[in-house]
Image (cartoon, helix red, strand yellow):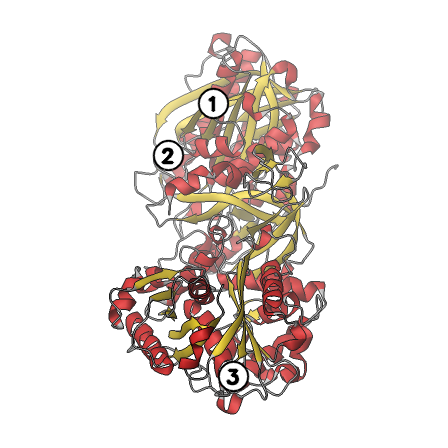
Amino acid sequence: MNDRSTADTSVLLKPDREVGIVGYGAYVPRYRLPAAEISRIWKGGQESGLPVKEKAVPGLDEDTATMSIEAARNSLARAGIDPQAIRAVWVGSESHPYAVKPTSTIVAEAIGATPGVQAADWEFACKAGTEAIVACIGLVGSGMARYALAIGADTAQGRPGDELEYTAAAGGAAYLIGPAGESLAVFEGCYSYVTDTPDFWRRPHMHYPSHGYRFTGEPAYFHHIVSAAETLLSALGRRPADYRYAVFHQPNTKFPQRVAERLGFQPEQIETGLLVPFIGNTYAGSSLIGLSAVLDEAQPGDRVLLVSFGSGAGSDAFSLQVTERIVERRDRAPRTRDYIRRRQEIDYGTYVRYRRKLHTH
Amino acid sequence: MRIARNWRTRQQRYSLVGEVCTQCGHKIFPPRDVCPHCTQPAQLPYALSGRGEVFSYTTMTSAPQGFEEYLPYTVALVKLEEGPMLTAQLTDVDPDEVRIGMPVEMVTRKIREDGEAGQILYGYKFRPLLERQTAT
Amino acid sequence: MRDVSIIGIGQTPVGELWDKSLRHLAHDAVVAAMRDAGIERADALYVGNMLSGELAEQEHLGALIADFVGLRGIEAFKIEAACGSGAAALRLGYMAVAGGLHDLVIVCGVEKMTDAPGADTTSALALAADQEYEVTHGLSFVALNALLMRRYMHEYNVPHSAFAGFSVNAHRNGAGNPNAMFQSPITAAAYQQAAMIADPINLMDSSPICDGAAAVVLVPSDWAGHGRGAVRILASASATDSLAIHDRRDPLFLEAAYLSSQKAYRQAGVTPADIDLFELHDAFSIMSALSLEATGFARRGEGVRWAEDDGARIAIDGELPISTMGGLKARGHPVGATGVYQVVEVVQQLRGEAGVNQVRDARIGMAQNIGGSGATVITHILAAE
C-alpha cells in the first residue's frame, strides 16, 4: 500500500452526464466439477485447503460467445429497450472463440443490435469486462450513445494438475449501460489503477496460462484491489460502512475475504456476491457475476462497491447506488442463483472430454 | 462448411427470426417467403419467442460428419408456442429426462466447428425451461 | 396417351458387392432386362440414382451407362429424387412411351453405396432431408424417422414391439429371394433385442446400406405381344410434400403418399381392395405403418396393426402381402435402385415367377417408392396382361 493517490477527485473516471446500469444479466453453465474430484485425480484425494467447493464447466456447445449472448439477452429483458438503440457491444474475455474475428459481432447479431453499433473484444485478463464497462460509461456519459453493452465472460482453462485447474471456470455477465434516469443502479464514480505487474500471462498459441505462484497475491491481487478501492473511497469521501454490499474479484474463496477484511468490510457485505465457492473463478465474468448476484437482492438506495482485478495488472473500482427501478426489473430475467442452482455434477473424465483435453488424433 | 450459406441465415439461426404472413397472420419458421397456409407472399420478418414444447425426439448414438464429438446428443421436433414446428438439438439435458410435451426454450449455442482452424457455426438449440425462483 | 407395358426385367443380387463397380452393376441389370425382353436396341435409357456423385464420385450416369452397355448414341440421363429416384426414372420412361416420344425405353435404377466409409454414407443419405433446417442440426436420416416413430408410438399409444411383424415378414420373404441381401428369417424376440441406432429405431427397424441395380424395358402395350410375360402399367403417379418433416401439416400423415396413391387408384380404376400385393417403401418399419395408412389400407394409427401376429396378414398367403421379396428391409435398399427393384418384383409376382414367394392368383400389384421421409412419393400399379 505505497504511493497511492490521496483524496484527489480528479483521478475519478466520471462522465459529464450521470450514467447507470439499465439492465443486467448473468449466465453460468450447467455442469459442476467438484474440487475434490480434481484432488482425487491429482493429489490422491486430499480435501483440506481446496480453493473452492466446485467450479462451473461449460457444455460442449458453449463458449464465450454463447454465454455472452445469454447474459446479454437477460440484460436486455431487464432493460426492456429496443436492441437497435444500442451503440456498442463490447465483450471482455481471455477466451474468445476466435483469435481473429470478434466475439462481439456474433453477440451483437444474436441480440439484434446490428448493424449500427460499435463492436469490439476487450482483453485484460480477469478485468476485461470492467474495462468494457468503463468504456461504456464514457460512451454514454459523453452523449455519444444512449445505450452501450459491456460483457465479461470466460471459459477459462487451467493446466491439468495445476492449482488453477481447481478454479478456472466458465460464466459471464452483461451490463447494459445507459442514462442514469433510466437506470436500476447509478455509477457514482469509478477509478482504475494499473501497473505493469507480471503475475499471470498466456503467450500466443499457448493453450494454458502461466503464473507467478505466490507473486500473484500481495504485489498483484491485493495491491491493486486495495489501491483502487481506497483511492475511490477517498475521492468519493466514503467509508466501507456506507456500502450495503461489496464485490471483489474472486480467484478463490480466500482472496476476496482477505481483501475485504483489509479494506474494513464485514463478511456480511461480501457474502451475497461471493460466488466463487460454488462456480469457481469465471475470470472476466468473476466480479461481474458477483455484482449481478448482488443486484438480484439489493434494495433501492443500497450502495455497492465493485472492484475487479486483472492480471498484468490492474483494478477497476466502481461505486454504485441502486435505484427504485431494480424492483420491477430484476424478475424480468433469471437470477444469478437460478443458474447456480441448475447443477449437474460431472466427473473428471467427462470434464476432460467437455474441455477438449483429450487428444483423439 | 459453406461460409456464405450459414452467413445468409444468421439471424434466423441466432435468434429465430421468422416471418409473419400479412394475409392470414400465420407465423412462419423457418422463413420461406411464401406462406405455407395461404400460399401468399410472406416476407415480413417476425422474431419468435423461442418458447415451445417437444413434439418428438431421439438421441443420436452415431453422428453425421462434423458432429461426432458431440455424441450422444438429442434432437427434437419442437412446436413453438406461436405455431410453427422446427427441428433442432436439445441441450443441457440428459437424454433420459426428455419427454414429449416437455416445455423448452431457445438458446443460441455452438452447432459445430469446421475443424480446429475452420469456422464455428452457431445456431438455435432448445433446453428445458430454466427453473426460476422469483422471490427470496 | 398410349398404354405402356413392361416386357423385360433384370436385377443384380443386393448386398456388399465388393467386386462390382457402379457401371458393372448397371450393366448386369440392363443386359439382363434386355435379354429378358428379347431386344438389342433401345430409344432411350433413364437411370435412377441418388448418390453416385457423393459415394461413387461419378455423375453423368446416363451417357456413362448407355455407352457401357453398348447403347452409345441413344438418349440417356440420370434422374434423382432421393430414395425415390428409381420410381422417378420409371415414371420418366413411362411418360416418354405413353406420350409417344419413344417406343423402346430402358429404365435402370442403380446405387453403389459400400465403397464409401460409413460416416460418408450417413451424411450422403441425409442429403434427402432439408440441409439448412434439418441436417444442419446434426440429424441423420435415421434420426428423422426416429422422430416420426417416437411420435407415432406416443400419439397412438403403441409399444415398439408392435412393429416387429413388419421386420419378421420382410426377413421371412427375403429368405425366399435369391437376390435378397438377408436370406435368414428373424424372430420377434430378435427384433426386440437388436442394437439401437436412434431410439426407438433399432437395427431391425432399418433397411441396410448396400449395392444393387435393377432394370425394366418399356414399350407401348400394343407392342407388348412381342415380349415374354408382358405386364401393363395401369397407373403411374407421383406427388410431393415438404422436404422437412417440421413443415408438414401433420407429420404423421404421408400426404404425398396419399395424393400419389389416390391418383394411381383413379388412373387404374381400382381401389385398395383390388390390390393383390403391395411393395411398399419399408426403409424403416415406421414407414410401413405410415404408408399403409396413407394408401388407404388402414385408418390413422392402425397401420401398425398389419404387423400383428408376426405379420400374418401381410405374409405371402395373407390378406395383403407386402415386401413379398423381402422389401427394403431384407432384400436391401440400394437407394436409387429400390424403386426399380420394387417394380421388377411386382412383375415377377404377376408373371408367376416369384418362386417360393409366389403370391397366389396375383393379378394386380402396387409399388410405392418414397423419396426422403415422404417428400416425393411415386406409385405404380401393374397388372398381368
Kind of residue at badge 2: Lys
Q: Nearer the viewer, residue B8 or A73?
A: B8
Nearest-to-viewer mark from 3 and 1: 3
Q: Chain of mark 3?
A: C
Graded by Cα atoms within 10 Å as few (under 14), some (14 to 19) or many (20 or more), the crowding at tag 2 reads few
Kind of residue at badge 3: Gln
Q: Which mark is residue A101?
A: 2
Q: Position of residue C111 (x, y in %)?
A: 37, 69
Both labels 2 and 3 in a single chain: no
Q: CA distance from mark 1 to mark 2?
A: 16 Å
Q: Position of residue A201 (x, y in %)?
A: 35, 36
Dividing the picture into quadrants, the one containing residue C196 is: bottom right
Name the secondary structure under disc 3. helix
Q: CA distance from mark 2 to mark 3?
A: 64 Å
Residue under the image location 69 percent in, 27 percent down: A329
Q: Nearer the viewer, residue B87 or B68?
A: B87
Name the secondary structure under disc 2. loop
Q: Which mark is residue C273?
A: none
Counting every numbered tag in the picture gives: 3
Kind of residue at badge 1: Val
Q: Chain of mark 2?
A: A
Q: Which residue is mark 1?
A: A117
Asked if the residues shown at circle 2 and circle 3 are in contact, with their CB atoms under 8 angstroms apart, the answer is: no
With C385 as the anchor, is B84 left or right in this view? right
Q: State whether residue C111 is above or below residue C60.
A: below
Q: Chain of mark 1?
A: A
Q: Nearer the viewer, residue A133 or C229?
A: C229
